[in-house]
Image (cartoon, rainbow, N blue to C red):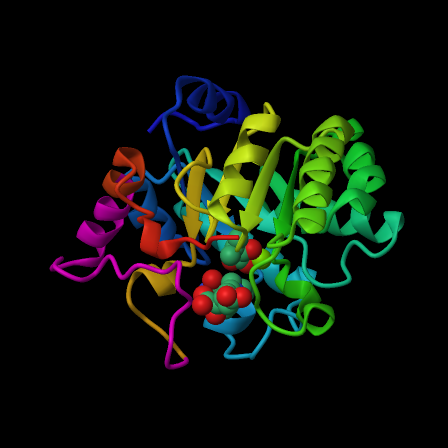
């Protein structure tokens, strides 16, 4: 696979071809994802839940994310690697810069941080210093204690208007990508059309420029009883993990995943 860059993803958005992204935490799965044609590997702080067994992403440290980035990098074959800045790792501008440096030097091509318009200064600072930034909006799991649970965001018009304005503000600040988590499909479509940068959705309907899922979820592995509504088990009907990963790529590219049943309405 030729190296995927932000330019590649930008041209996929322009062409209307969907972008495929999965979380990934180690070299073996990085190799398997690349073989299936997954374009973006996210070393997510969801590792705190699916690898460490915590009940939120809050205990994860930058050093832990960096360890997994280095592992993914060794198995990578051309995918763009994004690393999550964990909880409180971008609370101040100094922390933002030093923790982003740690992740980029471990092998990430881009960092992701959760928030809204307040991130503008951090994003501008990082972009000026050569660090591409993905802004994670909507349901931001690091704020679960403020949000009162993992709930759909942007369901009323005031919230929706704010989210549209925030997305445009972050694009103007220099964000190169947006992840939209658990927002009504109509709102996700509006935001996708309002910005020129790629918008990747999870629980955000099929109109975004691409999709992301947690690897363990799409392989049908669930620690807790009920998986979120937006998860599809791609192991169903497949006889190998490699086939499940390929099915995910095929369905995202064909826009047969996500279906209406995987999305939320206002
Ligand atoms: N394994 C895993 N998968 C994920 O998608 C994920 C993580 N971990 N850890 C970090 C966050 C937490 N996430 C979650 C967890 C639960 C729901 C959930 O149950 N949502 C309800 C929506 C309820 C509503 O209508 O407001 C759902 O029915 O899906 C959503 C996102 C997404 N992220
Ligand atoms: C669910 C995705 C977007 C994420 O941030 C993670 O896996 O940590
Ligand atoms: Mg995350």
Decide: is 88 above or below 137: below
Q: Residue at x 42, y 46 (%)?
A: 205
Q: Residue 167 location in percent, x, y? A: 68, 37
**Predominant secondary structure in magenta?**
loop
Query: Does residue 7 appear to the left or right of 163 in the view shown?
Result: left
Q: Residue 102 location in percent, x, y? A: 70, 50
Q: Residue at x 45, y 45 (%)?
A: 41
Query: Does residue 246 appear to the left or right of 83 in the view shown?
Result: left
Q: Is residue 28 visible?
A: no
Q: Residue at x 63, y 48 (%)?
A: 136
Q: Depth check: 35 or 120 in front?
A: 120
- Residue 162's quadrant in the figure? top right
Q: Is residue 245 visible?
A: yes
Q: Is residue 135 magenta?
A: no
Number of on-image labels? 0
Query: Does residue 251 appear to the left or right of 29 in the view shown?
Result: left
Q: Residue at x 38, y 49 (%)?
A: 30
Q: Depth check: 225 or 45 in front?
A: 225
- Residue 66's quadrant in the figure? bottom right
Q: Residue 209 location in percent, x, y? A: 45, 33
For the magenta stretch, what is the residue range?
224-249
């Amino acid at each position: 696979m030729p190296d995927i860059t932000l330019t590649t993803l930008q041209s996929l958005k322009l062409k209307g071809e969907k972008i495929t992204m999965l979380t990934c935490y180690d070299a073996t799965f990085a190799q398997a994802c690349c073989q299936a044609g997954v374009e973006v590997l996210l070393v997510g702080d969801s590792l705190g839940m699916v690898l460490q067994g915590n009940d939120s992403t809050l205990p994860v440290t930058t050093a832990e994310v960096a360890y997994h980035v280095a592992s993914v990098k060794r198995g990578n074959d051309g995918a763009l690697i994004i690393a999550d800045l964990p909880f409180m790792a971008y609370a101040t501008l100094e922390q933002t810069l030093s923790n982003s440096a740690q992740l980029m030097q471990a092998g990430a091509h881009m960092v992701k941080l959760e928030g809204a318009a307040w991130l503008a200064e951090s994003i501008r600072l990082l972009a000026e210093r050569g660090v591409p930034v993905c802004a994670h909006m909507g349901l931001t799991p690091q704020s679960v204690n403020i949000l009162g649970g993992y709930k759909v965001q942007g369901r009323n018009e005031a919230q929706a208007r704010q989210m549209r304005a925030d997305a445009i503000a972050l694009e103007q600040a220099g964000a190169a990508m947006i992840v939209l988590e658990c927002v009504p499909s109509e709102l996700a479509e509006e935001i996708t059309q309002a910005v020129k940068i790629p918008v990747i959705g999870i629980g955000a309907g099929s109109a975004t420029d691409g999709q992301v899922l947690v690897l363990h979820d799409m392989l049908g592995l669930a620690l807790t009883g009920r998986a979120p509504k937006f998860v599809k088990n791609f192991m169903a009907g497949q006889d190998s993990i490699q086939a499940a990963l390929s099915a995910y790529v095929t369905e995202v590219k064909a826009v047969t995943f996500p279906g209406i049943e995987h999305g939320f309405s206002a």
